[in-house]
Image (cartoon, rainbow, N blue to C red):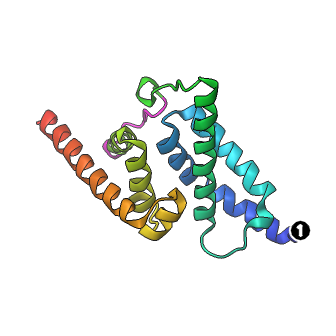
């Protein structure tokens, strides 16, 4: 069992990861409710299994890998139950930013573009380009070879560049 001070630090560090963890969960689930449920389940599991965290490496890598594994398990359960229907993120209004600032609007559009990428591309792009994980860390988190990370990242960047180009042309 961890000393109380270490457990307090662990929980504090976990709470600080919540915004990043939710963004990652959104790339996996494509649904705000499912993402929130997944984040809650991951936090519960991380706290109950904090004794398994050895303190080496990055806590967020450990938590992201746990998130991915829990989502894969959930998708399998849904396939078995036949309840694989999910609400498309673009049918929901929850990602709209009410701020009038152009920067906030652009960030919202970029987030939608990232989430419009297929799951594997969106997750790799988020982990490497937004969260700053190395290719190796990303490969470990997602359970894929490092070459696949590089390939997916390249494809994601090309697709996002094309989307941004189309968006710019539409505005002109």
> Dot 1, crowdedness within 10 Å: few (<14), some or many (≥20)?
few
Q: Is residue 13 within the magenta segment? A: no
Q: Residue at x 33, y 46 (%)?
A: 103
| Image location of residue 109, percent across then percent down | 33, 39
Q: Between 47 and 139, which is closer to the camera in this rendering?
A: 139
| Image location of residue 13, percent across then percent down | 68, 63
Query: Residue 32: which quarter of the image?
Result: top right
Q: Residue at x 32, y 43 (%)?
A: 106
Q: Residue furthest bottom?
A: 56
The quadrant of the image that shows the C terminus is: top left
The quadrant of the image that shows the N terminus is: bottom right
Q: Magenta part of the protein: which range?
A: 94-103
Please indicate whether residue 144 sits to the left or right of residue 77 in the image: left
Q: Residue furthest front?
A: 80
Please indicate whether residue 50 sits to the left or right of residue 27 in the image: right
Please indicate whether residue 35 sits to the left or right of residue 106 in the image: right
Q: Is residue 19 visible?
A: yes
Q: Between 21 and 109, which is closer to the camera in this rendering?
A: 21
Q: Main secondary structure of the magenta part?
A: loop
**Count of marks placed on residues:** 1
| Image location of residue 166, percent across then percent down | 17, 39
Please indicate whether residue 166 sits to the left or right of residue 37 in the image: left
| Image location of residue 115, percent across then percent down | 40, 41
Q: Residue at x 44, y 65 (%)?
A: 132
Q: Is residue 134 visible?
A: no
Q: Is residue 98 within the magenta segment? A: yes
SS at mark 1 in the image: loop
Residue tagged 1: 1
């Amino acid at each position: 069992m961890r000393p109380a001070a270490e457990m307090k630090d662990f929980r504090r560090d976990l709470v600080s990861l919540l915004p990043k963890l939710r963004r990652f969960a959104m790339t996996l689930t494509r649904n705000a409710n499912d993402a929130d449920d997944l984040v809650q389940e991951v936090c519960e599991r991380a706290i109950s299994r904090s004794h398994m965290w050895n303190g080496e490496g990055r806590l967020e890598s450990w938590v992201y890998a746990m998130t991915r594994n829990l989502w894969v398990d959930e998708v399998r359960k849904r396939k078995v139950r036949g309840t694989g229907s999910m609400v498309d993120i673009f049918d929901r209004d929850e990602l709209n930013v009410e701020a009038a600032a152009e920067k906030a609007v652009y960030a919202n559009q970029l987030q939608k573009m990232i989430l419009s990428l297929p799951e594997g591309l969106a997750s790799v792009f988020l982990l490497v380009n937004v969260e700053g994980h190395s290719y190796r860390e990303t490969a470990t988190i997602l359970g894929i070879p490092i070459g696949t990370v590089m390939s997916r990242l390249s494809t994601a960047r090309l697709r996002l560049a094309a989307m941004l180009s189309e968006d710019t042309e539409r505005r002109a």
